[in-house]
Image: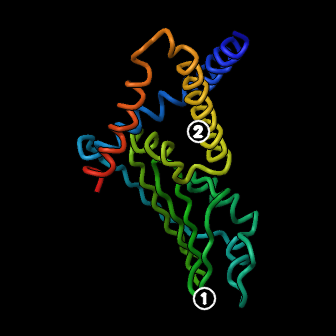
Amino acid sequence: MQVYRTMHLWHWISAAVCFAALILFTVTGITLNHASAFSASPRVEGFEATLPAQQSALITGETAPATLPEPLESWLEKEFGIDLTNASVEWSDEELYLSAPGPGRDAWISIDRATGAVKSETTDRGWLAYFNDLHKGRNTGLVWTIFIDVVAAAVLFFAITGMVLLWIQARQRKSTWPLITGGVGLVVALMIFFAH
């Protein structure tokens, strides 16, 4: 009886912890599985500017700095409204290229190292793409990746405690093992015969 109470408590707690995330991942699983049914019209915005002399001096030297200089990063973020915290930076002799994608959006900035001409483009793919990217962990950063792993562990724990509860109650419910066997068999059959 003590095992039953403990499993019931842990099952309830794990369900409460992952409730909101489980709903999010379930709904976005459906939207991802039927992506062609949800049309989106991406909004693309392009901007151009010229680097001020102070920032231009930071990138016109013979050798490129190892990282994006902080004053330049601050100016670009303020000028274009793009968060460059986790942006990838590519230096070449001719240009500095920054890629700063995020969930549901793509953004890039290109700077001509000789002239200081700056071009930027931001593509917003909409709220559905945002939530789908959260589901996939696409361009979401380390904290969200850890969160997804914690939710996955909580859901696994929820399933295991549920299985223990089913095992404990199987004597009173004769259909427990046939239903579990049927559920496992259905998944295996679908994987073998239909998921090519």
Distance from label 2 to label 1 (Cα)? 45 Å
- Residue at 57%, 80% (x, y): give it: 95
- x and y percent of residue 96 in the render? 59, 76
**Quadrant in which the N terminus is drawn:** top right
Give the SS element for disc 1: loop
Name the residue carrying label 2: 152
- Above or below — where is 108 with respect to 8? below
Q: Residues within 10 Å of mark 1 (few under 14, many from 20)?
A: few
Q: Amino acid at mark 2?
A: Ala
Q: Which residue is mark 1?
A: 93
Residue, far bottom:
62
Image side of residue 136 versus residue 9, left or right: left
What scheme was used to colour the molecule?
A: rainbow
Direction from residue 181 to residue 149 in the image, left or right: right
Badge 2 crowding class, 10 Å Cα cut-off, few under 14, some 14 to 19, many 20 or more, is some
Vertical position of residue 170 compared to residue 18: above or below: above
| Residue 55 placement: quadrant | bottom right
Q: Nearer the viewer, residue 67 or 159?
A: 159
Badge 1 amino acid: Asp
Asked if residue 175 is positioned above or below residue 69 in the image, the reply reads above
Quadrant the C terminus occupies:
bottom left
Q: Residue at x 67, y 50 (%)?
A: 142
Pointer 2 with pointer 1, Cβ within 8 A:
no
Q: Judging from the image, what secondary structure is the residue with disc 2 in?
A: helix
- The spot of residue 111 in percent (x, y) is 56, 74
Seen at 53% across and 20% down, the residue is 166
Residue 128 location, x and y as percent? 39, 39
